[in-house]
Image: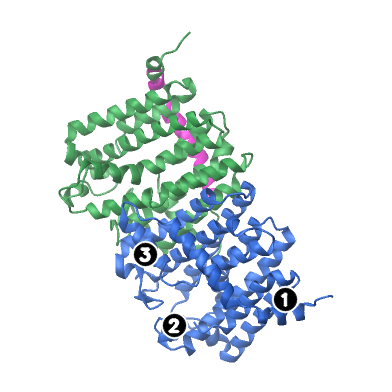
Chain colours: A green, B blue
Amino acid sequence: MVVTGQTHSNQASQFDLKGYLAVRQQQVETALDRAFPVVYPDKIYEAMRYSLFAGGKRLRPVLCLATCDLLGGTTDMAMPTACALEMIHTMSLIHDDLPAMDNDDYRRGKLTNHKVFGEAVAILAGDGLLAYAFEHIVEETKNVPSDRLIKVVSRLGRAVGAAGLVGGQVVDLDCEGKKDVSLDTLNFIHTHKTAALLEASVVSGGILAGGSDSDIQRLSRYAQAIGLAFQIVDDLLDITSTQEELGKSIGKDMNVEKATYPRLLGMEESRRQAEQLVESAKAEVAGFGEVAFPLMAIAEYITARKN
Amino acid sequence: MVVTGQTHSNQASQFDLKGYLAVRQQQVETALDRAFPVVYPDKIYEAMRYSLFAGGKRLRPVLCLATCDLLGGTTDMAMPTACALEMIHTMSLIHDDLPAMDNDDYRRGKLTNHKVFGEAVAILAGDGLLAYAFEHIVEETKNVPSDRLIKVVSRLGRAVGAAGLVGGQVVDLDCEGKKDVSLDTLNFIHTHKTAALLEASVVSGGILAGGSDSDIQRLSRYAQAIGLAFQIVDDLLDITSTQEELGKSIGKDMNVEKATYPRLLGMEESRRQAEQLVESAKAEVAGFGEVAFPLMAIAEYITARKN
């Protein structure tokens, strides 16, 4: 039987994403916990653990595990990189929350790292997480050729640095309070702040599994689409959610004159674009067949999520 | 003719270190400049470049190039790692100078990064340098097997993270203002804050050249000795230098009740220990013969330097 992309898309909607995520998230929790024993000087390990285990959904690790699986790799091959992605994501949250940056006291309903450990330790916890991410990949990954690890290190480095997260955050800070931010600039911010690490998550799983160049490119397009959709939905949620659901101050981005998609495009058009991006993401991976169901379901979840 | 370690030690003293450093430093400047073109968003690249080109002596890159050479490697094999070491070192200086940490307005006679670019950009410039260091090694190193690059990434990651620089800085901040800091704690601070990255510099050059385990261990002992000597001399210079020579406020460490070797051991004993460490460092590498002259001369330079 020839199964078309459309049929797969419908079947993917039936996929038990909740069950899949629960299993994957538990695997990630266990691996992260094992990766961070508390040793002297305890305070820095406690600070890193505080934010690592502050209730993240482990989306980036799960994406990495899912794409490694999709291209025939094992969970073991991808787990150290999956953990490293969460370390890098956590680093970016800790540093973004600092008084000199977004100055947030709460994240996911919990005090931010610097509110608990002080600014100095929070800065160092971020640095420690970032450095350890790279060490962890190359030290803990077994049964993967070194050539692939090198590529993963390169992708992750680029996704975090000035050509990725850091570059996006610099432009974001620059735009704060400005009323004339263009859609191009907003896209730059989010393709760098959010999409770059999501793309690295998706692509690194594929690289670890030994995917072909064309497979990797397909995964990259999937990731770029869900990355941008993710940010648009974040902007929409910031307006529509209750504080309780989101665990942070509502409408904060609207109040500080921050450039957002709803502000530039309106609510309706933003929602339409997010949905279109999710459809194109699903279309990219539908050709892989049933093994792509987790990725397709995750794409759908991004627009359906409530927080 | 059998050349003894003692004879080599004397010959090493005649070695033209000044000329050697001038050539190596120029090679590093050129490579670093090429590694950091200014692209959009310009501000972050300018901030990274500001501190990268603020007059550093390039000790870590030079050590890396020297040990790669010592074990038969080429300058090209080691240069990307040499540059990465300077990026990591610069990151640690930018973050250490922040108001939440040591709160320094000047370094090497120039305004610190956050005084010029603001705290947010300074934090991000550090993050960008750290991430790019790893990317640069794996992207730019040619003609070195991936297995060796993996080892270098691991060593550098450990040297920066909670088991290295970051861990040392946490304990250092914790000790500020305390009068009862033990010699063990002071040694922990400096083997982590200073010696760890010096060791990674020395060892990574050896790994890139394909050194044997016993060669690498020898280089590691050399590096640990000069690392600690370096810090003791730093403490001594803090007391004896004029502000003009050092480019930072003199006696600052004494004023804030900071634990230092002169405070714990006295000036004379500190000087004696630094000299002893330099002798043992030289003895470690004397067996390599003439090719070790740069390393031996660098060890001597550490106690002889005036800033």
Looking at the image, residue B188 lies above or below residue A195: below
Q: Residue at x 47, y 76 (%)?
A: B175
Q: Residue B225's quadrant in the figure?
A: bottom right
Q: Label 1, on which residue?
A: B283
Circle 3 packing at 10 Å, graded few (<14), some (14-19), many (20+), is many
Main secondary structure of the magenta stretch: helix
Q: Earlier in the sequence, mark 2 or mark 1?
A: 2
Q: A203 or A67, which is in the foreground?
A: A203
Q: Label 2, on which residue?
A: B246
Q: Secondary structure at mark 2?
A: helix
Report the chain holding disc 2. B
Q: Amino acid at mark 2?
A: Leu
Residue B162 seen: no
Number of marks in the rendered image? 3
Q: Position of residue B139 (x, y in %)?
A: 51, 48
Magenta-drawn segment: A10-33
Circle 1 packing at 10 Å, graded few (<14), some (14-19), many (20+), is some
